[in-house]
Image: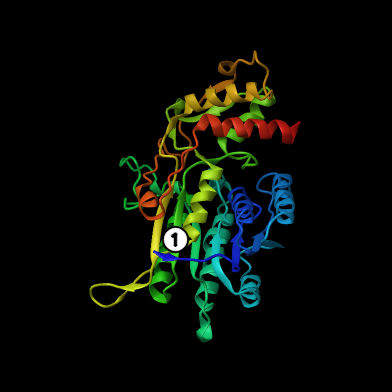
Amino acid sequence: MQKIELKDKYILVTGAAGFIGASLVLRMLGEDDNMHIIGIDNMNDYYDVKIKEYRLGLIEEAVKASSSDFNFIKGSIADRDMINELFKKYPFAVVVNLAAQAGVRYSLINPDAYIETNITGFYNILEACRHSYDNGAPGVEHLVYASSSSIYGSSPDIPYKVEAKTDEPVSLYAATKKADELIAHSYSKLYSIPSTGLRFFTVYGPAGRPDMAYFGFTDTLVKGGKIKIFNNGNCLRDFTYVDDVTEGVLRVMKAAPEKKNGEDGLPVPPYALYNIGNSSPVGLMDFVHILSEELKTAGVLTEDFDINAHEELLPMQPGDVAVTYADTSALERDHGYKPSTDLRTGLRRFASWYREFYG
């Protein structure tokens, strides 16, 4: 691995108002590295924009106590001219592409959004990284980008290893993420761009995405509705707390795949992939009951709330998978890190945040 020094460097974070993006920026602002952070987000209304504005507010407050600075730009990575202008203006050393149209089920409704952001947008980022070396410029030292556990599809090989076969996606979202990995590999090979893809596993926590189960379930239960539990509850999910994810991302940012030649004397693509997951899958029914207990403790639900009366068991949804389970041995080997926050602790923090945010 090639060590990357972040001190005094320009760093681009796309999707900076998103769940993981904002969490990463906040984590970076806590470092004493005098970083110049540029954040991009299109602030779309896929979910409540007020939560994105809330995250940006947290960043604004954090900047006041940080040695680093943050400049936010509202825009889409699918806007190639804007991306090219940014790369001309700032000498980015590290690029972290977290901007994406997320969600498996939404890809059945609005596939155009996934092609625009996940394919065209990521291509724009790769092209800008490629040309950052023009005319002898030092260029981008490390491109880190978000992939997803969804690319494993319905693979029976549990836990999922990064070396596993991933060419049978079961949703368009998963297919776009697999495409990102393949395109990034080709750019690493052709232009020696050090790049690392991160396969995130069911990220959750305070100020998260309302379309995720833990958040959507909470909204439904607060309103007295029934939560829809697919595959009759026979699912396992590798829930990963957001702070664990951002710690993993930051560690990866600081160590890029090394440029080197193979035994045949030809360049080896400086390319890597890692799973970032908790490696402790939890049954969906267990998850629902832990969530309800923590919501009661936080005062979001009343103590006598009957969770069993608010459950609706349904068949598996198109695009969903029964199990997600991360093998993080590669992350541990190369970066000395393994996520460890247990589900109850993470949901307790979410429940407290939910109570505070929604009153």
Query: As drawn, is 259 to the left or to the right of 227?
Result: left
Determine the image quadrant of residue 157.
Answer: top left
Element assignment for label 1:
strand
Q: Position of residue 323 (x, y in %)?
A: 40, 36
Give the residue drawn at x 47%, y 57%. 252
Q: Position of residue 94 (x, y in %)?
A: 54, 66
Q: Nearer the viewer, residue 178 or 315?
A: 178
Determine the image quadrant of residue 190.
Answer: bottom left
Please say whether residue 135 is visible from this viewpoint: yes
Q: Position of residue 189 (x, y in %)?
A: 38, 72
Measured along the vertical axis of the image, is residue 30 above or below residue 341?
below
Quadrant containing the N terminus in the rendered view: bottom left
Q: Which residue is mark 1?
A: 196
**Residue type highlighted by circle 1:** Thr
Query: As drawn, is 93 to the left or to the right of 319?
Result: right
Q: Nearer the viewer, residue 227 or 58?
A: 58
Q: Position of residue 89 (x, y in %)?
A: 66, 76
Q: Nearer the viewer, residue 351 or 202?
A: 351
Q: Residue furthest left?
A: 263
Q: Residues within 10 Å of mark 1 (few under 14, many from 20)?
A: many
